[in-house]
Amino acid sequence: MQALQALPQPVIAQVQGIATAAGCQLVASCDLAVAAAGTRFGVNGINIGLFCTTPMVALTRKIAPAIAFEMLATGAFIDAARAREVGLINRVVDPEALEAETQALAQTLAAKLPAALQMGKAAFAAQAGLATPAAYACASAVMVDNLLLPDTAEGIAAFLEKRPPNWG
């Protein structure tokens, strides 16, 4: 699960059916998630006497601790709408549209400057555990580094000239 978070590119989960225990952990470990309506999410090991402590790590970093603990302690499942509401997933779509919606999201990301996405993903993770002043310092340093990329200059020029960027 840590390897997913360490990848420089954003990772998208496409989910349908039931995501339980490590499956729910996998979804929580991804950067973005698209789920089919009717999908259920849970960490229900407690129902057999096993508190899902490793899935807990990813889950508590993705959703509010009180909601995560309730899921972990009760073994209750949440549906896709609730998962979106609490921030576990980004989108809920009809099952027939799941593949197309996930691909559309991937295409949107693929059209962005890869270096900017990579820097942004790393900065997003790095600043999350910092106190606010340190988080701003971290984010500011990354923004300066991003601004110094030649392709960023091209992106800004393209915006000002009202044309698509021509990444190098």
Image (cartoon, helix red, strand yellow):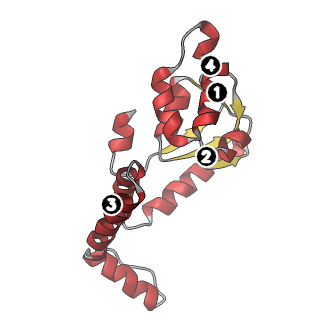
Q: Quadrant of residue 77?
A: top right
Q: In this view, does 160 lie to the left or right of 122?
A: right
Residue type indicated by callout 4: Asn
Q: Mark 2 points at which residue?
A: 87
- The x, y position of residue 165, in whole percent, is 40, 79
User: Which residue occupies the extreme bottom position in the image?
Assistant: 161
SS at circle 2:
loop
Identified at 32% across, 64% down, the residue is 137
- The x, y position of residue 108, in whole percent, is 51, 62
Mark 4 or mark 3, which is nearer the start of the sequence?
4
Residue type indicated by callout 1: Met
Mark 1 or mark 3, which is nearer the start of the sequence?
1
Q: Nearer the viewer, residue 161 or 166?
A: 161
Q: Residue 44 carries which label?
A: 4
Mark pair 3, 1: CA separation: 33 Å
Q: Which part of the image, by quadrant, shows the C terminus?
A: bottom left
Mark pair 2, 3: CA separation: 22 Å
Residues at discs 1 and 2 in contact (Cβ within 8 Å): no
Above or below for 7 versus 75: below
Residues at discs 3 and 1 in contact (Cβ within 8 Å): no
Q: Name the residue under label 1.
A: 71
